[in-house]
Every structure is written in C-alpha cells, then in structure tokens.
Amino acid sequence: PDKKSKVPTKWGGASLTQIEKSFNGFPMKTFLLGGGAWIYHNKIKLSSNEIEIIGEDAIRAELKGRVEVEDLKNQTYFYANKGFYDKVTEKVVLEGRPRLFHTSKEKKKTKISAEKITRYLNEGKTVLEGRVYIENDDLRVVGENATYYESSKKLEIVNRPFIFAEHKF
C-alpha cells in the first residue's frame, strides 16, 4: 500500500461549492472553499481567502488570496498571494510576494523573501528561488537561490551571495 496516500488531510471553509472538472483527462470532484478556507496536512495548516481542492482527498489544491502556511512545530510561517498544494509530493509552492517568518528558540526573528518559495512538508526542506533576501537583527543576506534544511538547521545560498552585517561586508 502507498504510504503517502494515507496522509490525513482535513479541509473546510465558510462556503463550499462542488463541481466536476477534468484533471489530466479524468473527471474529478472539485471543491471551491471560501471565507477563511483551510487545509491541514498533518499538523501544518494552509489557509487563504479561497481554495480550489481537486478530489475528496485533496490530492491537489490552489490557494488564492492571503495565503498562509503555519508550521507551529518549527515556529515557521509563510505568507503569499497564491499557493499550490500537492498531497502526493507533499509540497506547497508559494508565489506572489512570498515571505517566510521564523522565530528561533531564543526568540530571534528572521524574515525571508524570494520570488518563489517551495516547502517540502515531509522532508523539512524549503527551497527559495529568485531574489532571495534574508534579514534579522544581526545581518542581511542577498542572493539568487537558497535551500534550508530543518534537520541540520543549515541554509545553503548559491551564486555568490552578499552578506551585510555590523562592521562587515
């Protein structure tokens, strides 16, 4: 049996409209959620003004308007104008001015923005693509692409990043 298909997904909203749509050539039930719509992927909450869910098990979803991804376990929050959720690959892609906010155990806040942020929910990995800006009280980093690995707390920034810090360049 496929383990990934058993990932529990709960979803809801203030309004619900059900329609039949074609997805990859197959007819699928599609649900339009409005008014504070949300999806839970394990303990990670995805919410937005409107969510279009494909399939009763929320195989895929498109999030539109004021998209938020809350990962309380890792004290990480993402915000964007639109997002795409894929249950099978267990990832969320955020576009439209995506931003990530992280608070460390020491209560240190870090803000990260990029043109596109992809969060791999099962792997604890976040990929930042295009005009990456990382800011906190101590420094500012500017780069083109970056990958953050939660298990090792390691951030890899590629393509010659610029680091600005107090009395350093």
Image (tube, helix red, strand yellow):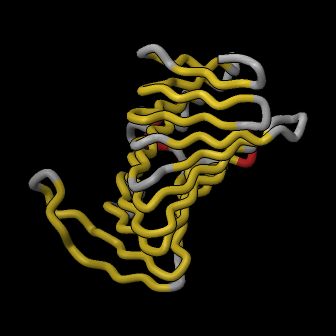
Residue 168 visible: yes
Residue 153 lies, in percent from the top left, at 70, 21
- Image vertical order of residue 145 relative to residue 159, above or below: below
User: Which of these two is toward me, 14 or 130?
Assistant: 130
Query: In the image, what residue occupies the spot 35% across and 53% down?
Result: 60
- Image vertical order of residue 16 relative to residue 127, above or below: below
Extreme residue toward the front, this view:
167
Quadrant occupied by the N terminus: top left
Q: Is residue 105 left or right of residue 26?
A: right
Query: In the image, what residue occupies the spot 66% across and 37% down?
Result: 135
Residue 15 lies, in percent from the top left, at 46, 85
Q: Is residue 25 left or right of residue 41?
A: left
Extreme residue toward the right, this view:
106
Residue 2 visible: no
Q: Is residue 78 left or right of residue 55?
A: right
Q: Is residue 14 left or right of residue 91?
A: right
Residue 7 lies, in percent from the top left, at 52, 44
User: Which of these two is toward me, 20 or 51?
Assistant: 51
Query: In the image, what residue occupies the spot 40% across and 42% down?
Result: 116
